[in-house]
Amino acid sequence: MSDDELGFPKPLFRRLRTLPAVGPFRPATWRSPLRGPWLTSVFAIVLLVGLPLVTITGLLSYIAYGPQFHQAIPGHVGWLHLPYFAWPTRPVWLYRFTQGLHVALGLALVPVVLAKLWSVIPKLFTWPPAKTLAQVVERLSLALLVGSILFELATGLLNIQYDYIFGFDFYTAHYYGAWVFIAAFLTHVAIKFPAMRRGLRARSLRRELRTGLADTTADAYEPDGLAPQAPARATISRRGALGLVAGSSLAILAFELGSTLNPLRFTALLTSRGQSYGGGPGHFQVNRSAATARITPADTDDTWRLTLVGNRGEAVSLSRTQLLSMPQHRASLPIACVEGWSTEQHWQGIRLRELAALVGVGRPTYAHVRSLEKRGAFNQATLNTDACRDPDAMLALKVAGDDLLPDHGYPARIIVPALPGVHNTKWVSSIAFHGAA
């Protein structure tokens, strides 16, 4: 392919190719004898398996938020919207698993991503940047891939720390960033998959795991390859490099699992809610306190009433004392948050389907829940059919045998199996049920 076919002015492009490479653009700058197609391919195959899992579980979280009810963020995504379906309530640990996997695996892959970038960094500084149209497409996809994955990791890490220094809406940016990553990832895999297969065959994994530092040698140099032109003496073996990356990932995973698995909570050193028990019954985490939500004692005193509304406007007003006098349902259910932490508690309250029956809705198809909280993006939630009818879905009045504390949603909150924590609305003021009699 000629320079003209690339769309470059011929004299300018020829002059660009004759300019001497300087600094990081000089092949001799990169001297690590570990770099080569095999090591890069090992990191690539791990990411080829792990990154799609992180992406899929992230998109499932978006579905769990109920975009069909316009309560997911971003709300209007045009042709980027996913096929909507009703998020199920069974198994009860579903959202806890998918979102816990999304965060834990995303964190564990950070060392692998950094190692993969280290292994290919000389290719980011090739000179000239592109010689053919295929190289232009490849480098554009690579720039988008590197940029999008670093953006997703950085904003995700800041989100689980509740540190929104970036000044824009995390959920919107993270969603669109995911689609940029998906497009770049698929393009890069299509281009590089054959090279990855060849790279994996270049060396034996078993042999490399037995090769120590003294016997570590560089691959043969190729002008368009990853091996160094002037390799330095090895200071770590490939076995050591793989062990360092794997050990880092396993350590991160161990420190994160405690935020999802209660018995390991003491290991949750990486997330801001991991070891923070909050206060009150059950000693579980609090994302949004009553003070933050501007819920005052006057809002939740003996004058509080729960308003139930039916299809035809039938309304019932119940005090907390009246609710406590009704048959109580008890269940151990988890709460899981988008930041990756979760906890399982023993709840007591009134089944939602029994509350629906009080206003003549025997078979609810959806319910709209409102909170006493007057501000905030999640001061209301719409529950789908499964959430309304599930035998464990309830308006919780107590947790761990005691009354809810204000920070946990007193006087009443929604608890639905497998529902994202933010839609287990706290400080409930009303529930409007819709469905058949």
Image (tube, rainbow, N blue to C red):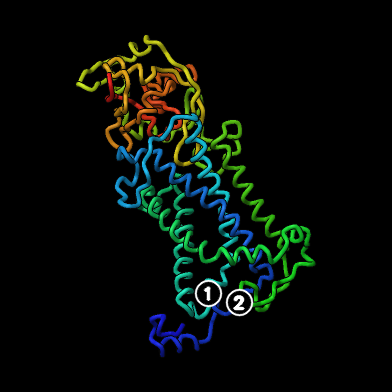
Residue type at mark 1 is Phe
The residue that appears at 42% across and 35% down in the rendered structure is 420
Residue ID for mark 1: 125
Disc marking residue 29: 2
- Drawn side of residue 63 relative to residue 311, left or right: right
Dot 1: within a 10 Å radius of its alpha carbon, few (fewer than 14), some, or many (20 or more) residues?
some
Asked if disc 2 and disc 1 are in contact, CB closer than 8 Å, the reply is yes
Choose top left, top right, bottom left or bottom right for residue 426. top left
Q: Looking at the rendering, in which quadrant would you find the C terminus? A: top left
Q: Residue furthest top?
A: 325
The residue that appears at 48% across and 66% down in the rendered structure is 142
x, y (%) of residue 47?
57, 55
Q: Is residue 329 visible?
A: yes
Q: Residue furthest left?
A: 313
The residue that appears at 40% across and 85% down in the rendered structure is 4
Q: Is residue 430 visible?
A: no
The residue that appears at 39% across and 50% down in the rendered structure is 175
